[in-house]
Amino acid sequence: MRWVAIFEDNEGKESIRKEHSNAHFDYLAANRDKIVIAGGLRPAPDEWFCGGLWVMEVDSRDEAVNLAEADPFFKVGLRKGYRLLVWGKAPCYD
């Protein structure tokens, strides 16, 4: 089952993002089999990050929650919160 996590960052926490980015990227790499694509969100190309988006392939909502909340960015307080939504591809995409 595909889940999408849309993360919102706390404002003014740029230093947390910078300090913990390596741990965050290591976490994504270690869970690449379940977090199939991930990346930061910005309000505009030249602006700082305001959150992130993950597409996960997991068996349950609980598993998606556990992945989201074990991320170093979540654990150190960068994330203000997140939404989890079930996602399905349109039939014209392989």
Image (cartoon, rainbow, N blue to C red):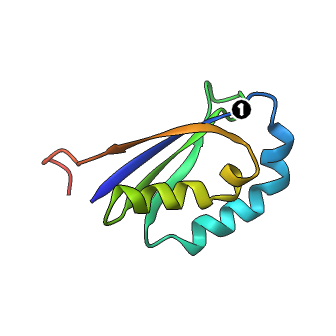
User: Residue 61 lies in what quarter of the image?
Assistant: bottom left
In what element is the residue under mark 1?
Answer: loop
Task: Determine which quarter of the picture holds residue 49.
Answer: top right
**Quarter of the picture holding the C terminus:** bottom left
| Relative side of 28 to 15, left or right | left
x, y percentage for residue 76? 76, 51
- Most extreme residue toward the left is 91
**Which residue in the structure is indicated by mark 1?**
10
Q: Where does residue 85 sit, x and y in percent of width and height?
A: 35, 42
| On screen, residue 46 above or below 88 | above
Question: Left or right of 40: which side holds 59?
Answer: left
**What x and y, as percent, mark residue 19?**
85, 53
31 shown above or below 93:
below
Instruction: Tell me which amino acid carries mark 1.
Output: Asn
* Quadrant (top left, top right, bottom left, bottom right) of the N terminus: bottom left
At x 67%, y 62%, the residue is 25
- Most distant residue in the front direction: 62
**Front one among 77 and 13:** 77
Query: What residue sits 58% from the left and 74% below the top?
Result: 30
Please tell me how many numbered marks the rendered image carries: 1
Estimate how packed mark 1 is, as few (under 14), some (14 to 19) or many (20 or more) residues with alpha carbons within 10 Å: some
Q: Residue at x 82, y 46 (%)?
A: 16
> In percent of the image, x 65 and y 32: which residue is there?
50
> Percent position (x, y) of residue 17?
77, 46
Q: Is residue 68 left or right of residue 24?
A: left
